[in-house]
Amino acid sequence: MAAPAAPGSVVPSASPSLLAPSPLEPAPFPATSPPEAQRAERPRWSGRNWSARVAAGDAPAVVADAEQVGLDATMHQADATDLAALADAARYAGRPELAERAFSVTRRRFPSSSRAHTAAFLLGRMADDRGDARAGLAWYRTYLGETPAGPYAAEALGRAMLIVERLQGREAAVPIAHEYLGRFPNGTYLLQARALVDDR
């Protein structure tokens, strides 16, 4: 009689993040892939050229197209390029909740992509702009931790500096101001950083 098959190995869980999870970050997909039958039933996503349509100023039509496809289907099947374009379209069309959903799904499904890193910054800016300073700060720190030299690093660090000053006081923001001046001596937040350093 053949010996029973050995049970599958257990995949260890990831180490907890140093940052508290953002309430906008959705729960991760299961680590196991769907059965072959389920994968066969799911159609491949066909690129919809949403990026070009957003660039042409057709953001409302992109949102409408996603809704016609079905938002749940779009979130599960769209590639990273179309998800990012949908998030941008939703922002421009005044649909922030849809933009946040698309950005969060981008981070969940494509965690190592440049679009996922950009999504962290944009989630931070959206939170910051609507007055949720703590969520904004957490997302800026996430972005800077993932891409310290990324294209939005100067803005993320400058905005983080101002939030820390508001929430924790000038003394807490001074080290960030020194970092900002050292890294971005001609940055947009130069005057605010110098004011923090000079007023000590």
Image (cartoon, rainbow, N blue to C red):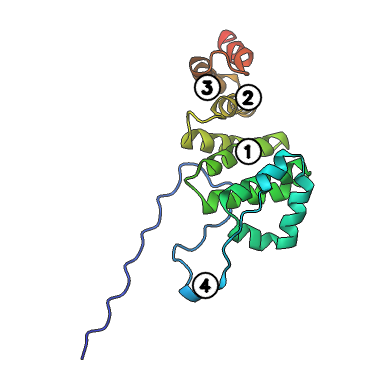
Residue ranking furthest to the top: 198
Vertical arrangement, residue 84 with respect to residue 145, above or below: below
| Mark closest to the chain's N terminus, 1 or 4 | 4
Residue 25 in sight: no
For label 4, count other residues whose C-alpha is less than 10 Å away and answer few (under 14), some (14-19) or many (20+).
few
User: 96 and 56: which one is in front?
Assistant: 56
Residue in view at x 48 percent, y 69 percent: 34
Q: Residue 7 at x, y = what percent?
A: 31, 75
Residue indicated by mark 3 = 176
Give the CA distance from mark 1 to mark 2. Answer: 17 Å
Q: Amino acid at mark 2?
A: Leu
SS of the residue under disc 3? helix
Q: Nearer the viewer, residue 37 or 134?
A: 37
Asked if the residue under mark 3 is in contact with the one under mark 4, i.e. CB atoms within 8 Å, the reply is no
Q: Amino acid at mark 3?
A: Ile
Separation of residues labelled 2 and 3 (CA atoms):
9 Å
Residue topped by disc 2 = 162
Query: What's the residue type where badge 1 is placed?
Result: Leu
